[in-house]
Structures are given as C-alpha cells and as structure tokens.
Amino acid sequence: MDKNQKISLYIKGYEEGQKEAWTDIKRLIKRHDGWDLRSRIESKLGTLYQDLASKRAELMDDPALLGLDEREREEPQESDEVDWDEAFYLIIEDKPSKSMLALKELVENGYQGLCISNQFPNKLKKKYELPDENITYIQLQKSNFGSDKSCIRCSPNNLTNISTKIGGFIEKHSPPAIVLHGVHSLTLTNEINTVLSFIEWIKDRVHKNDGFLLTSISNSDFTDEEIGKFKGYFDEVIYDG
C-alpha cells in the first residue's frame, strides 16, 4: 500500500470518527436547552470537510506521522504507459487527451463510461474518436444556450444536482469508468475544498462498484498548492505533456 492509499484510508477513518462523535453530541444536546451550543455543533458538522482537508495536508507534508518510510514518501513519477491497475487517477494535462483515450480504452474493455466536462460532447467524440455507445455525457454549463441536446446539462455551481446524476448513472451502469474533466469550472463557482469533498464522494461510489475515476486538470488552471491538494486524493498521478 503506497503513501496516498495509506493517507486516504486514515482520512476515511478520521472522517467517520469525527462524524460519529459530533453526531452523538448533537443527539445528546437535543434533549436539553442550549441553542448557542447546538449552533456551534451544527457549524462544526458543516465545516468538517475543512478539518479533513487540513488533516490530509498535514499528512502529505509529514508522512512520518503514519510511519511511512523514505521510499513511500517519493513523489509520483511521470508515466507514459498506464496499466490502469488502480481505481483513482489524477491526470495533469493541458488538454484532456490522455484521459479521453483512457476512457475509450476502458469502454472497449467492458466499462460503462461517464464523461463530465465543460466541453461539448460532440467535439470530444470527434476529436478523440470516442464510441457512440456506452458513454454518457454530463456537460457543465449554466445555461441551455448552445448545449448539446444529446447530453445531460448541469450547472457547475449545483454540486447536489451533479451528484444526483452521477449516482443515478452508477446505479444503472456498472462497472463505471468516469472521467471528470471540468474541475476548473467547478472551482470557479465552489470552494476548492468543497470540490475535493465532491471528488471524495465520487470515489466512494466508484470504489463500491469496482470502477475507475480519472480526474483531468491543467497546470495552468491551478496553483502548485492547489495541485498538491488534488494529488492527495488519488492513488496515482500521471503527467501528460
């Protein structure tokens, strides 16, 4: 088990413990008066994702907290050939070429594809020669103007709606192979930590259905610090270009 897997496992347990503890406290408080304290607890539960992001960053900065050796602390290496053995990949690329070609390969091997992008599906299909069958598209766009009628349109500022569409897709199409390309659009209208929690939610659903999540981001859209945050959420990081 590598560094990122160990950290993800630790964070999952940490999150479950925090939720259980604060939910129990909330349950006890409901039996008594104390609106101020109750409000504080509600606030704590509401900002739990910030605590998780902070804890993850702490572990990434000092992996020794989990007893990781020097070999496990090394940064992910660049890779040209990918065997797709892991479940969660972060692909850092200027254009979504590697992620789209990976989606095509996975679909050809029996996976059910879902592409979430701010680009027009027809443009992606033509450019990357994606198959007409077994790939569903969610286009991230605030208005219906100019949108492709063959896809599902979701506003990038409505993560709840996007989550519902993703959840519905996974229920009906397994095993799933999901490409999340429109990350930058999501962070323009949502806090980055909220988007990271959203990605963690997708990972949980993908893991339960033996699928893949390939998240594509560009160096030009994010700072080094932000990219560092993204890296902590994935099994493997791939650089293309």
Image: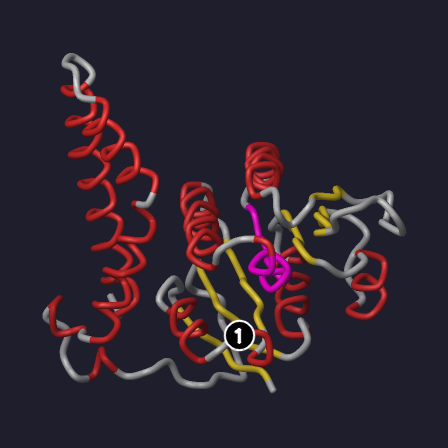
Considering the image in quadrants, where does the N terminus appear? bottom left
- Image x and y of residue 183, in percent: 58, 61
Q: Secondary structure at mark 1?
A: loop
Is residue 185 one of those drawn in magenta? yes
Q: Amino acid at mark 1?
A: Phe
136 horizontally vs 149: left or right: left
227 horizontally vs 100: left or right: left
Which span of residues is magenta-colored?
176-188
Quarter assignment of residue 226:
bottom left
- Image x and y of residue 116, in percent: 66, 53
Q: Please state which of residues 15 and 36 is positioned toward the viewer in this rendering.
A: 36
Q: Is residue 96 above or below residue 144?
A: below
Residue extending furthest right? 146
Is residue 220 one of those drawn in magenta? no
Q: Residue at x 30, y 67 (%)?
A: 4
- Image x and y of residue 105, in percent: 64, 64
Q: Residue at x 26, y 40 (%)?
A: 44
Residue extending furthest top? 31
- Image x and y of residue 40, in percent: 24, 35
Q: Residue at x 78, y 57 (%)?
A: 131
Q: Please state which of residues 102 and 193 is positioned toward the viewer in this rendering.
A: 193
Considering the image in quadrants, where does the C terminus appear? bottom right
Q: Which residue is mark 1?
A: 222
189 horizontally vs 129: left or right: left
Quarter assignment of residue 61:
bottom left
